[in-house]
Image (tube, rainbow, N blue to C red):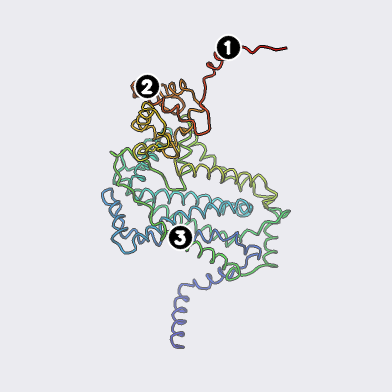
């Protein structure tokens, strides 16, 4: 055993004498940081780096089997899922690792923003972090395309249509992205090159630069109220704090990073085992138009925003707002590089984060169940509840059949079953009179098309008669105001008795 240990030391010394990497790495590991930075708030950057390493490792293994061609991509994923031992688990790890990486990078940027860590002298560290976030989202988008299923095909088509709106150069940009006029093998090859070579290469270079600046400039000290950042004195004050309260990064501060990264890794493994891989859904087929493609969760908010935006505002929002947002993030440390860092003294920062977080959360939630989209099979898969047919006349029951056969259930729900695009019909008769229902059915209105040409008079009569019975259990049907006036005018006035 002593001989084996000595041989190991001799081998290490042989490599160290030629490479000289051991000493710098030890110095990096043992560099001192202010003791107030040994906090659970400072673990997100390390966790993002660990997840990135996981993505590289699983991505390399997937690339050994994946075939980036239009005819074989979908089949290669099926082969991974069903024929390669633990291939499904490898795909699941890569997919869930992508989701976790996007989430952790976002949380890390929010933490840096709230802690004022973008201020002097870490302006460039923040700017590179902004580009790292954009590259991470780029990796997520290109990875979804490589699944090359129905979601990927139609999602890519939507992305191409958005890119085509760029003034003057929209057409050439679409050709550059797709590798031709249509989504085909060239498209997949380009996205494979972006996902496997271009974006990861840039990411590795920027992550290295990001870590180097953190080591060179030090970890941002924990913000305290009243401790202002002054460009003339900050560096000297930081060095003094580091000298007085400094602790070695390894092991005194790094153990929390390691524990959190391990917990994230276990969470990724748990999600991979429990939920499995993402897709692929049906094979990409442009002839199948009855589909409801959705992006992965980190783009669901954009999916919902585009669904709700008026057509006239789509192009300005798509091309002006992102430019303004990215420019604001890049210019932030240059315009606000000094002053207070503590969040209690920066209420505007809290307000900005809160508004953005709530907005993204609401739109992401809406994107999960797409209330603006018809449910194309609701009319056939969800029968009208029996309770809505009790005590109905033959004509009213015929109206229920019309409601079902004309696929009204795709957009409207009854008894909690059906579409969400239009209002629920359970109590429609309490706020619309019979005449109003007839007019709405025949002429449409709001986001409802007119069905005057799709229904014959007998179908319209039956449908409206059924709808007028839908006023709940304890609610009264709506009454036309004009009829109330006529009734009041023809009523016998009461006599005044002395």
Q: Is residue 151 above or below residue 474?
A: below
The residue mark sitting in front, 2 or 3, is 2
Give the residue pinned by disc 1: 489
Q: Is residue 368 above or below residue 447?
A: below
Q: Are marks 1 and 3 in contact (CB under 8 Å)?
A: no
Marks 1 and 2 sit apart, C-alpha to C-alpha, by 35 Å
Q: Are marks 2 and 3 in contact (CB under 8 Å)?
A: no
Give the residue pinned by disc 2: 452
Please report whichever mark, 1 or 3, sits nearer to the chain's N-terminal start: 3
Marks 1 and 3 sit apart, C-alpha to C-alpha, by 73 Å
Q: Nearer the viewer, residue 274 or 400?
A: 400
Q: Residues within 10 Å of mark 3 (few under 14, many from 20)?
A: many
Q: Residue at x 47, y 22 (%)?
A: 436
Q: Are marks 1 and 2 in contact (CB under 8 Å)?
A: no
Q: Is residue 259 above or below residue 405?
A: below
Please report whichever mark, 1 or 2, sits nearer to the chain's N-terminal start: 2
The residue mark sitting in front, 1 or 2, is 1
The residue mark sitting in front, 1 or 3, is 1
Q: Quadrant of the C terminus?
A: top right
Marks 2 and 3 sit apart, C-alpha to C-alpha, by 53 Å
Give the residue pinned by disc 3: 268
Residue 206's x, y, as percent? Answer: 49, 55
Q: SS at mark 1?
A: helix
């Amino acid at each position: 055993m002593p001989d084996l240990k000595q041989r190991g030391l001799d081998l290490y010394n042989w490599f160290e004498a030629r490479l000289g990497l051991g000493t710098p790495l030890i110095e990096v590991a043992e560099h001192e940081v202010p003791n107030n930075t040994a906090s659970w708030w400072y673990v997100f950057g390390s966790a993002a780096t660990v997840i990135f390493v996981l993505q590289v490792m699983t991505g390399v293994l997937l690339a050994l089997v994946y075939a980036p061609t239009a005819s074989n991509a979908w089949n290669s994923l099926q082969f991974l899922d069903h024929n390669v031992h633990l291939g499904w688990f490898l795909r699941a790890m890569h997919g869930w690792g992508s989701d976790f990486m996007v989430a952790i990078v976002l949380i890390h940027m929010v933490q840096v923003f709230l802690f004022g860590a973008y201020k002097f002298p870490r302006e460039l560290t923040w700017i590179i972090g902004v580009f790292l976030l954009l590259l991470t989202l780029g990796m997520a988008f290109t990875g979804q395309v490589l699944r090359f299923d129905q979601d990927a095909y139609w999602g890519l088509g939507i992305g191409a249509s958005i890119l085509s709106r760029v003034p003057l150069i929209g057409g050439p940009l679409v050709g550059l992205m797709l590798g031709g006029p249509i989504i085909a093998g060239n498209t997949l090859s380009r996205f494979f090159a972006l996902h496997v070579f271009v974006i990861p290469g840039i990411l590795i270079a920027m992550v290295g630069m990001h870590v180097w600046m953190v080591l060179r400039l030090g970890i941002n000290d924990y913000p305290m109220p009243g401790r202002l950042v002054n460009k003339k004195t900050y560096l000297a004050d930081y060095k003094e704090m580091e000298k007085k309260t400094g602790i070695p990064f390894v092991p005194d501060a790094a153990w929390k990073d390691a524990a959190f990264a391990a917990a994230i890794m276990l969470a990724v493994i748990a999600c991979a085992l429990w939920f499995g891989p993402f897709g692929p859904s049906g094979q990409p087929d442009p002839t199948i138009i009855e589909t409801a493609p959705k992006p992965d969760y980190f783009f669901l908010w954009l999916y919902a925003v585009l669904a709700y935006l008026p057509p006239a505002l789509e192009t300005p929002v798509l091309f002006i707002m992102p430019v303004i947002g990215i420019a604001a993030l890049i210019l932030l440390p240059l315009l606000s590089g000094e002053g207070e860092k503590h969040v209690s003294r920066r209420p505007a920062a809290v307000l900005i984060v809160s508004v953005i977080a709530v907005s993204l959360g609401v739109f992401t939630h809406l994107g999960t169940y797409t209330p603006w989209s018809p449910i194309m099979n609701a009319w056939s898969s969800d029968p009208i509840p029996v309770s809505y047919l009790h005590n109905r006349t033959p004509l009213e029951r015929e109206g229920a059949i019309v409601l079902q056969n004309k696929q009204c259930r795709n957009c409207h729900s009854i008894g909690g079953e059906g579409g969400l695009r239009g209002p629920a019909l359970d109590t429609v008769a309490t706020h619309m009179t019979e005449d109003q229902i007839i007019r709405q059915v025949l002429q449409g209105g709001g986001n409802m098309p007119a069905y005057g040409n799709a229904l014959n008079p007998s179908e319209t009569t039956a449908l409206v008669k059924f709808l007028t019975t839908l006023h709940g259990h304890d609610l009264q049907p709506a009454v036309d105001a004009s009829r109330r006036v006529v009734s009041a005018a023809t009523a016998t006035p009461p006599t005044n008795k002395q």
